[in-house]
Amino acid sequence: MSKFIVSQKQGVPFVSVQAMAEMISNHGIEQTIKELVDALEQDFSRWDKFEKSSRFASHSKNGVIELMPVSDGEMFACKYVNGHPINTKRDLQTVAAFGVLSDVETGYPILLTEMCILTALRTAATSALVAKYCAPKNAQTLALIGNGAQGEFQAMGMKAVVGISKVRLYDVDPAASEKVAHNLADSGLDITICKTAEEAVEGADIITTCTADKKNATILRDDMVKKGVFVNAIGGDCPGKTELDAEILLRADHVIVEFEPQTRIEGDIQQLSQDFPVTEFHRIVNGEKEARTNENNLVVFDGVGFASEDFTALVFLRDLIKKQDAYELLDLIPHQQDPKNLYSVVKAHSKDRGIAMNETMAIA
Amino acid sequence: MSKFIVSQKQGVPFVSVQAMAEMISNHGIEQTIKELVDALEQDFSRWDKFEKSSRFASHSKNGVIELMPVSDGEMFACKYVNGHPINTKRDLQTVAAFGVLSDVETGYPILLTEMCILTALRTAATSALVAKYCAPKNAQTLALIGNGAQGEFQAMGMKAVVGISKVRLYDVDPAASEKVAHNLADSGLDITICKTAEEAVEGADIITTCTADKKNATILRDDMVKKGVFVNAIGGDCPGKTELDAEILLRADHVIVEFEPQTRIEGDIQQLSQDFPVTEFHRIVNGEKEARTNENNLVVFDGVGFASEDFTALVFLRDLIKKQDAYELLDLIPHQQDPKNLYSVVKAHSKDRGIAMNETMAIA
């Protein structure tokens, strides 16, 4: 199978929100996350093949706009993503993402896609993959603190991959917890809405913090986290935005990160010194280090989201839309017969010159 | 007039190649470049308002993929652009660019557009604006060395803004020169195709080098460049890709750059030491420095293309498409009623669950 969806002269395949929603719904959310977990595992196992850099971030008063480029030498991926918690008050998404996948050999984009849904899926898959290595054996109960746009995806990922059966929800906004409970009512998960974070973490094997406020917050206090637990802290992901009491990190037996240089800037470990010991996750996948050595280990994943995860998701999507025909072609790059004759593309449209458009060019 | 084309809940305005070609053709190429020159001049005069960084570049054997982000605190712009000279042999563009303009306040993209044509226009406008300050008085003759995709735009910019009347063409590929001559036959410019670069520069007031090869080349030797000339060197724009004999730079009375940190890496001055004196162009626009003090000055613009120029072009485009209605709306960002209920966007499509799509959401 060619790695390209269509010939690069035909136009750029585009996946809209509606096309993505229909496709993932057809394919199944759990099934999609499972396949993404496998794809992520494969890409983390070839970590050295990626040209990596910390993401570009443009911070403003109410949010951040980020660019996340990465390449494996064959394909290039870049996600545009913002983070504006204030947006929900405007009936807008906190995160409005889109992305591009390109052919390194030609530099041409071969896929342009919505990435709000795809980001929620890849983040859930990343959390689930890390949990597969880091959660205690036979984990049954997930405490989910922060019940925003990604909440349900996180829960379904932990169900699909780790096999959790119970979810304990908490959010400062009770309507957000109600929303998750409603959406997951027919998921097979046993859902409990809790009045406090303390109540939510009772009996939890996995604690996922997934909050949006751009500030240094303490979503989890040290005394709330028991030995043996896996803390999946994914909401603290830019400078000045943290979720964990630093004591939890200091007490942890193992703190796992994605790409250390980026997490030092953006993760919960920004609260600690630059030499605080962490392990990059690919080393766990590759068997260089064990995530936990016994059932009493406290393991923390300080997840911020790394570009290679979007790369994996975009390559996965490239292959899925070929099977499902879930794209349209975008007229994004000129296709005139002589590539050096870009001027003809404009001139061909000069109505007053009477030159027919197709005389000198053919637009897909 | 609102700075937004449409409400951010309606979808993302998209300008296709065809829409761009029709719009620019209607508006007129010279008129477009003239207006872009005015817009660029205004933005260069408020240089300190921009959050600037050197562009991100991912180099591979045959080319480069770059991201060019910039913000003025109100709008954020980013261009994706490649450079693959080998592409013309595949009937593909050397440069396949697209870009996004976003609202810093919400982080939402408000415009997505083709940027092959737009880049050619903004590059021509930048060259013309710099020439307005740096070319000798009453410049009449342009030598255009390198007659690829941007050639005609460069010539039309120098005509529209500086008032040149003669163009002397040279390219290693004679068909490229024929193409430019053909396209500009009715432009009012007096066109001469030359057999050598030496012949092309005879009597030239402005020498534009606009070649694509990704190597250290000597398009202009020192002995080919007379006193008094303005050299507009825009083809040398990444590490290992230069056009000028270093002697020309060393002899020049004034070397002008866009954003010094980026040009040190990418421009022709990469051949020289890090302390070789250059002047950022905004200082010329703002009257802090004079581009030339007498008619014998040799002035060189070591142009590489800076993100703020794309910002200017994208804001210009935003306003032009409002007048011309030259866009379609792209379903790029979800618009469900409750922004936290992203899961419903996927779940609503679950055919086997029998939930109507419009029950919980409204996709634009």
Image (cartoon, coloured by chain):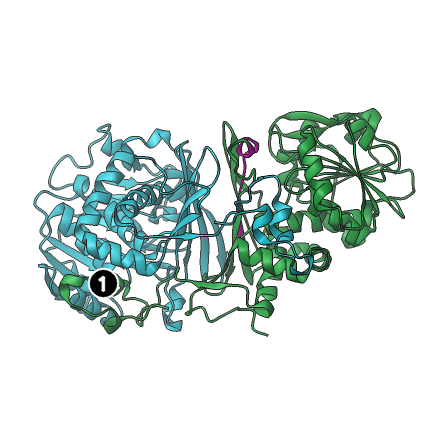
Chain colours: A green, B cyan
For the point 12% across and 43% down, the residue is B136
Horizontally, is A139 left or right of B17 in the view?
right
Considering the image in quadrants, where does the N terminus of chain B appear? top left
* Amino acid found under the numbered disc labelled 1: His
Horizontally, is A318 left or right of B128 in the view?
right
Which sits in the foreground, B225 or B21?
B21
The crowd level at tag 1 (other Cα within 10 Å; few <14, some 14-19, many 20+) is many
Horizontally, is A328 left or right of A248 in the view?
left
For the point 31% across and 57% down, the residue is B19
Specify whether residue A263 is painted magenta.
Answer: no
Residue B81 position within the rendered picture, expressed as x and y whole percent measured from the top left: 41, 54
Residue that mark 1 sits on:
A349
- Answer with the quarter of the image where residue A280 lies: top right
Specify whether residue A82 is painted magenta.
Answer: yes
Kindly give the residue lying farthest to the right in the view shown. Answer: A295
For the point 21% across and 29% down, the residue is B287
Residue B17 position within the rendered picture, expressed as x and y whole percent measured from the top left: 34, 59
A292 w.r.t. A311: above or below: above
In which chain is the residue bearing label 1? A
The span shown in magenta is A77-88
